[in-house]
Image (cartoon, rainbow, N blue to C red):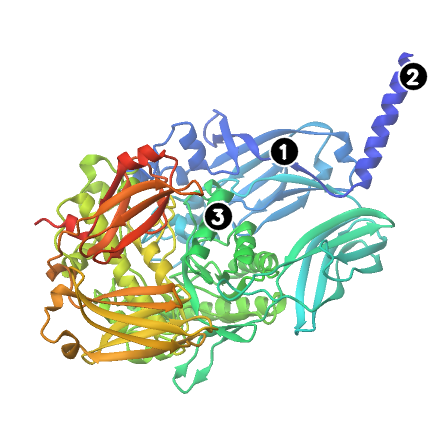
Amino acid sequence: MKNKLHYTLLLCLCMLARMAHAQTTVTLSLNGEWEFADADDSVWRKATVPGTVHTDLLAHHLIPDPFVGMNEKAVQWVDKKDWIYRKSFEVAAALLAHDVIGLQLPELDTYADVYINDHLVLQSHNMFVGHEVNVKQWLHSGQNQLRIFFHSPVRYDMERFLKDSLIYPAGNDASDIPLSVYARKAPYHYGWDWGPRLVTSGISGGASLTAWNKTNISDVWLQQQGLTDKAATVRAAITLETVQAGKYTMQIESPDKLFTTVTVEKGLNAGLQTLELPFSIQRPKRWWPNGLGDPFLYKVKVSILDGKQLIAARMLNIGLRTVEVINAPDSLGESFYVKVNGQPVFMKGANYIPQDNFRPRITDERYQQLFKDMKESHFNMVRVWGGGAYEKDLFYELADQQGILVWQDFMFACTVYPSDTAFLANVKEELRYNITRLRNHASLALWCGNNEVAVAIKNWGWQSGYGYTDAQWKTLQQGYDILFKSLLPEQVKTMDPGRFYFHSSPISNWGSKQDFTKGDNHYWGVWHGMEWFEAFNTHVPRFMSEYGFQSFPDMHTIRRFAGKNDQDIYSPVMLSHQKSTNRGNAAINTYLQHYYKTPKDFASLIYVNQVLQAEGMRIAIEAHRRAMPYCMGTLYWQLNDCWPGPSWSGIDYYGRWKSLQYFVKKAFAPVIVSHVEAQDKLQTWVVSDVPQEQPLTLEMQLMDLEGKVLWERSITNIQPKAAKSQLLYEVPVSELLKGFDAQKVIFYSKVVKKDELLTRNVYYFAKASTMELPDPGIQTSVTTGADGTIAVKITAGKLARNVYLLLENDPKSQFSDNYFDLLPGETATVRVNSELTLQQVKEQLKVISLRDTFKN
């Protein structure tokens, strides 16, 4: 009986081994609990993968939270040390029966030596390159060990710095010795003017083993070849890594049965090879950006079979569309605009930075929420800025799903770079990895070589500022051309032909009137140039790809990094979180004192600062949209934060909307009404992204602060055209006011479709600093709606400017609208997303308006 049992067990094990050998790829996750140690220490502690050294030290309370107080300075020692990570894991005999067992490391940060059972299997020198290496020969049945040695990025690159004869002009590197130029890792880790210097190391992309047999799909490129209303033709380029030569069947099918399955049998040789398999889709549905239609995605399954046995498969999405960037000389200068499916589209969005200095902490939920915020704010484009990092696959998948076009920078910003053979080879591998990884995405609109390097070479005074000799400066400029005008475009042309590439953003500077006629522009006259917000009305380029103004996050967020005694914008803690030079907070205060009265306390100052930022940016966005089709895009700086502190963001580190984001949502709406004073006349414009099937009506009123209507006009049968703006009414300001005090009246307008309000706007003839706002007599009621959500009704007897709602003890709360104006006698209903009960909301709700923040 015993021998029979042993025989049966042996037979089962053999069958399992054969089954394992026959099945598709098998993945063993190596994420979760690891150990780590200082390379100079013998103490091993628990670690978490994906993760970083900083977050593991933080979990053990070995460093203070660098986001709190002035702790950033206290953790600078971490990047000067080498660190070791290790993990023991079990390998079953069934896994070893596979032909190949690949160790997959999607992101190693950054200089790393990888060992399997003490065998060196990989050396990584680039955070932006994922790795897969066949480690089967070094594995054995039972316990195995994966060990990764991380070299200090500072010590590693210091050797390269000492061999060089010059200092690179990396002004945002928050160190006396700028080493970031040498490292192919996220530049913002070294500091920027909105974030801390936290130079990380770690297994930031996780780790796994993937086992497979015979042949495996290494890459699938679904290249759209043609698109008409009748049919779309797609070329599938399938790259296979084969270890067993033979005949295999390749199959492309639609899991949703939306196109005909294509099957072909091919003889494969051992090694890496790419096979092309065309297929077509009849009566295709097009992918459209947010606001213009459905971002429809076709599911495509690619399978490899040995006879009838499935041995490899990959599921992808494809969006069928055409995207063209038109950047060419025209009668007005040099155009820069995007056409989607043959239609010019005004781009609305922002510049995106990584959501955390410790990127492994960014959960899928945070990505999903951010894209929900973008869609709700009427974005159709987001720029992945060149000083951050190439984003994980989920980011681009969400962009595809939500209809958000991606302007993708390569990861170079604000400095010149080395151009030696080793550096260029490293970059070439980075390009290969990321271009092939991202090129299938319908959302990918364009590639940009770098952020601001070309304009800096011409205008930032680097040669004299850094004392470069003529020979050194010539070498640096030649290096720029090799990297951005040769290597990058050649790789894009080879691996993603047809996608627009330009070597640097912006194309034009902002110093002269002529600059605003050429391509895209980063206008920083407001903020860096200390020009007033009204300059946004006159400094309008063909495409605005950067502009902004700073604000602090709200009190909920400030309390998480600053104590009560730190609540002064010039306190050491508040200044330590201000990274825009030593004058950042002073600049905020200068603008605030120009446009508003002095706030009565710190909390009031924070509120007024957010309103200040929002009002200024509203002026800019409306100016850009009014200028259509001369101007065809507005991407403000910046969407989000990587840590808590003052910055140009509309959404803070904890995901809380600032006043700016509420204003953006309204200013980016498909149809807006906008006012501007020009040549002593008040102009009223209607701007639309979409053609209107039904005529609209524009209603305008001049009223005093208590609601008395002093003047009114109505214009009917308006039919705005897509991507166009219309000046519908203008009147001399003196004639309109007719002796009324400009400080005591407002101009109100709205656009309606039948009885539906599409958009509204309030224009103030005087700065808030000179207006005597009345007590609005705000009244509120809090109820539960039929859908279970909590609703707040707010009524104002007189004008209530910038009505602000806050739940004092609920930092996760979010209101459907905030910082809005209430007209005299008007009632608004705002919904609140909160974990509090109805009674708690009633008790904690705080409602103020601008008048409540003044000292007097």
User: Amino acid type of disc 3?
Assistant: Tyr
For marks 3 and 1 on the same chain, the one whose residue lies earlier in the sequence: 1
On the question of residue 569 being in view, the answer is no
Residue that appears at 50% across and 69% down? 482
For marks 2 and 1 on the same chain, the one whose residue lies earlier in the sequence: 2
Kindly report the distance in space between the C-alpha atoms of the residues bearing marks 3 and 1.
37 Å
- Report the disc number at residue 4: 2
Residue that appears at 42% across and 77% down? 719
Above or below residue 440? Residue 6 is: above
Task: Tell me: 856 left or right of 665.
Answer: left
- Marks 2, 1: nearer the viewer: 2
x, y percent for residue 466? 30, 63
Which residue in the structure is indicated by mark 1? 118
Per the image, label 2 sits on a secondary structure element best described as helix
Residue that appears at 54% across and 65% down? 293
Kindly report the distance in space between the C-alpha atoms of the residues bearing marks 2 and 1.
41 Å
x, y percent for residue 330? 43, 85
How many numbered circles are shown?
3
How many residues crowd mark 3 within 10 Å: few (<14), some (14–19), many (20+)? some
For marks 2 and 3 on the same chain, the one whose residue lies earlier in the sequence: 2
Above or below residue 823? Residue 531 is: below
Tell which of 421 and 770 is nearer to you. Answer: 770
